[in-house]
Image (cartoon, helix red, strand yellow):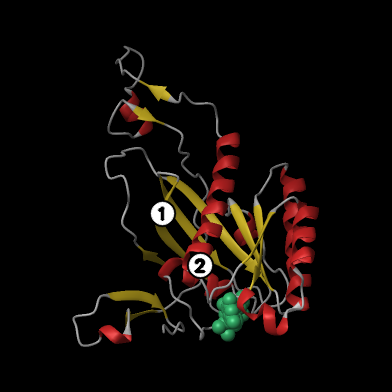
């Protein structure tokens, strides 16, 4: 079951098909994958969760004025990469997360980057990955991995690197997810068959179906920078949905509600 966290779309006039991007969040247990995912989707920090729950969420995003249908798989791999095909064959980009206060999780992130490099070699394709050092808020008390070490590891694998915190700014977390979308988009555009960028006129040719029918588009004037994903949604673990109030402070009013996974507690 997938959960949908809808956000208002900007640029309502734009009619082109949304870009579809699948993003998998990888990393050792406790690195903060779920906390970052839920922060991005709800702007909130969670502190309680079910560590065995793996689920895929979808969210409507606007990245650089483009409408993006983003799916995020918050993986639960226990301690080492397992049954990796479920995300390797599905994702267009990966966020590899470690915690700056855990050397073990940093070493774990290195195994994930190696796995992705091997997959890229085997499939002869580039899969963008971003390395994230999470729990930056803990750095002043219990940092075990320096920023330079994180940057060096990212440099070895040619990926972007950010230090973040699921507890701090939403905007910074959102920026990182949107960077992943940009990286995925770059690859999708590189790998998609050449298509015309602008078509100003549609003429029904005798032997050709109209463009609208062939592309499933409503209008003949369009910009086809977006790429429709052909990858299938994986079968994801069943997750029970619960509805919680979006804010305790709003309890006296008719509070809006959010649908969240069982196991997440919102503060
Ligand atoms: N201080 C701090 N704690 C965090 C942060 N992110 C996550 N945590 C805490 O770290 C613990 C693990 O976070 P999760 O998001 O469940 O980690 P995970 O990587 O999803 O772990 P698994 O579900 O076991 O794979 C939880 O107690 C979170 O509250 C952060 O940025 N700062």
| Marked residue nearer the N-terminal end (1 or 2) | 1
Question: Is residue 68 or residue 250 the one in the foreground?
Answer: 250
Distance of label 1 from label 2 (alpha carbons)? 22 Å
Dot 2: within a 10 Å radius of its alpha carbon, few (fewer than 14), some, or many (20 or more) residues?
A: some
Whether residue 135 is visible, yes or no, is: no
Residue 39: percent from left, percent from top: 48, 71
Query: Where is 254 relative to 196, above or below?
Result: below
Residue 246: percent from left, percent from top: 32, 78
* Residue at far top of view: 206
Question: Is residue 162 or residue 1 the one in the foreground?
Answer: 162
Instruction: Say which residue label 1 marks.
Output: 61
Image disc number at residue 97 = none
Side (left or right) of 146 relative to 218: right
> In the image, what residue occupies the spot 41% across and 79% down?
240
Instruction: Say which residue label 2 marks.
Output: 236
Residue 150 location, quadrant: bottom right
Query: Where is 64 relative to 28, above or below?
Result: above
> Which quarter of the rendered picture does the N terminus lie within?
bottom left
Query: Where is 199 relative to 228, above or below?
Result: above
Which of the four quarters of the rendered structure image does ligand 1 lie in?
Answer: bottom right
For the image, the number of numbered tags is 2
Side (left or right) of 230 relative to 65: right
Helix, strand, or loop for circle 1? strand
């Amino acid at each position: 079951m997938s959960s949908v966290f809808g956000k208002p779309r900007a640029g309502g006039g734009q009619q082109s098909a949304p870009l579809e991007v699948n993003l998998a969040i990888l990393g050792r247990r406790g690195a903060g994958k779920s906390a970052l995912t839920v922060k991005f989707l709800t702007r909130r920090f969670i502190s309680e969760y079910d560590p065995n729950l793996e689920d895929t969420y979808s969210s409507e995003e606007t990245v650089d004025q483009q409408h993006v249908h983003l799916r995020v798989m918050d993986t639960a791999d226990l301690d080492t990469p397992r049954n990796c095909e479920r995300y390797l064959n599905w994702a267009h980009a990966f966020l590899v997360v470690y915690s700056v206060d855990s050397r073990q999780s940093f070493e774990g992130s290195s195994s994930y980057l190696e796995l992705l490099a091997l997959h890229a070699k085997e499939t002869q394709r580039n899969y963008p990955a971003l390395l994230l050092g999470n729990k930056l808020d803990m750095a002043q008390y219990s940092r075990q991995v320096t920023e330079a070490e994180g940057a060096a590891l990212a440099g070895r694998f040619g990926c972007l690197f950010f230090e973040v915190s699921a507890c701090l700014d939403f905007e910074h977390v959102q920026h990182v997810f949107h960077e992943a979308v940009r990286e995925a988009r770059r690859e999708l555009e590189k790998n998609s068959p050449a298509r015309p960028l602008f078509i100003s006129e549609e003429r029904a040719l005798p032997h050709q179906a109209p463009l609208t029918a062939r592309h499933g588009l409503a209008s003949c004037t369009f910009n086809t920078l977006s790429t429709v994903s052909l990858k299938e949604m994986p079968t994801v673990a069943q997750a029970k949905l619960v509805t919680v109030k979006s804010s305790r402070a709003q309890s006296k009013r008719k509070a809006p509600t959010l649908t969240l996974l069982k196991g997440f507690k919102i503060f």
